[in-house]
Image: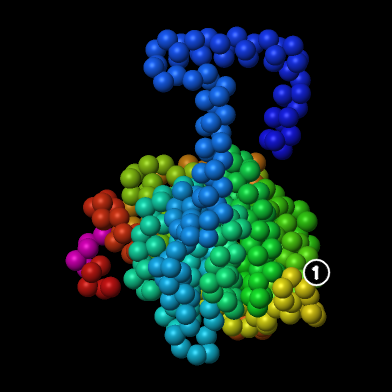
Amino acid sequence: MSQLKTISILDNIPSSTQSKSKPEKLSYYTHRCRSNFPFAIPISKFSLSCILFLSLLLFYTFKSPSSPPRRSLAVDWGGAAWERRVRSSARVRSRPGHSVLVTGAAGFVGMHVSIALKRRGDGVLGLDNFNGYYDQTLKRARQGMLERTGVFVVEGDINDKELLKKLFDVVSFTHVLHLAAQAGVRYAIQNPSSYVHSNIAGFVNLLEVCKSANPQPAIVWASSSSVYGLNSKLPFSEKDRTDNPASLYAATKKAGEEIAHTYNHIYGLSITGLRFFTVYGPWGRPDMAYYFFTKDILNRRPITIFEAPGHGSVARDFTFIDDVVKGCIAALDTAKKSTGSGGKKKGPAQLRIYNLGNTSPVPVSDLVSILEKHLKVKAIRKVQPMPRNGDVRFTHANISLAQKELGYKPTTDLEAGLKKFVRWYLSYYPDAKKKSAWDFEVLDCIS
Ligand SMILES: O=C(O)[C@H]1O[C@H](OP(=O)(O)OP(=O)(O)OC[C@H]2O[C@@H](n3ccc(=O)[nH]c3=O)[C@H](O)[C@@H]2O)[C@H](O)[C@@H](O)[C@H]1O
């Protein structure tokens, strides 16, 4: 696009303007150079030499076989030591096990699933671009947790094809758990292109590399409850239509499901999509309501609670992280192998989609009451009509398919899950402890 634009702009410059103005400028600078600088050469020759030198430099940097480590997002990757770390992290420690590439490993769900897989002996390699969508120090702290468990997180982007190919050259991954995404429903109003970049272009790039890999991995990836959009039939079932997205986020996740269908159909990739329902818990995402409500309640700042028209409540099927981790692992364990190889389909492959919810929606105002109880601080509530920003009024998962095929059975209700979250929050942010009305001696005894 931008290239086309540049060409058209240049095309519109009258040729007379180009030929008249440039020599004047050149002669002025050439003159100044000659008078002040003893080794001056005419600018045109100088520029030519620079271009030649830079071209040679670029040629040797990118062509030379002895050039690694390479750069991606201004981060080094490549080289023998790096490859050893990648291999070691992805090595299966107890058989039978998977060798899993986890994209978005420094994210909330990514960290939890990676640790759970690693602890049971699977090989896990993380990939994350550590973008600045929310507090990067939290992502780095999650990386610290991962590294202490033996998971190496490669710093790079799913749009970097060269890096992905390299990872598949070094390791024959049996599975890819694709969690890297631009998350958040309402942020799409501010930064729409980031959703297209990560959730569509990045996903296609990853699938392109997976389809050409030999062997092809099985793929499990994060879709979203938001694909049910403006549907009013409850609870949401995988059989329901998903063509009423209410946000660009939802539309990109829905597009992901269609893209998954295409790659399964053409290339024989085994693909499982998991529709997550408002996942929360320790090490969560600071952009989510339960997280920033906690911060604001502790700081005695007002929180905004959205309400539906006619003073109707807005509710979510909040799902605790440990339940979602079990669902992700069950999806990996039950995934059949992809059937293609080297970009060619050999037969029909598995294509699945599951709701991973909690099956008990809770109004947002009740979530606030639970937080108040656990924090022992009263919230300053401001109730406001739900803005038109992509939010939906209600989510409620029918999980019978996941129950039947994955053995998925959520066990943590919002009260218990938020208790664990608050406990983590107060220990992660030492200043928060002082703002809560908890008696911490009592709390320490209980934990
Ligand atoms: O299931 C998903 O697929 C998505 O879940 C999550 O989206 P949501 O369910 O919208 O969670 P979240 O923002 O925590 O808002 C929770 C509730 O608080 C209400 N809400 C929000 C903000 C506010 O100021 N006030 C308010 O009442 C708001 O109206 C809502 O009812 C993930 O962020 C998303 O990435 C995706 O994974």
Location of residue 33 with respect to 135 vertically, above or below: above
Queried whether the magenta region covers residue 439, the answer comes back as yes
- Residue at the farthest left position: 441
The residues colored magenta run 438-442
For residue 167, what is the image quadrant?
Answer: bottom right
- Mark 1 residue crowding within 10 angstroms, few (<14) / some (14–19) / many (20+): some
Q: Quadrant of the N terminus?
A: top right
State whether residue 55 is above or below residue 103.
Answer: above
Q: Main secondary structure of the magenta part?
A: helix
Tell whether 113 sits left or right of 428: right
Disc 1 marks a residue whose amino acid type is Ile
Residue 48 on the magenta span: no
Which residue is labeled 1 in the image?
A: 266
Residue 190 or residue 3, whichever sits in front: 3
- Residue 385 in view of the camera: no
Question: Could you tell me which secondary element the residue under label 1 belongs to?
Answer: helix
Q: Position of residue 432 (x, y in %)?
A: 29, 53
On the rendered structure, is 262 left or right of 364?
Answer: right
> Percent from the top left, x then y, of residue 180?
56, 60
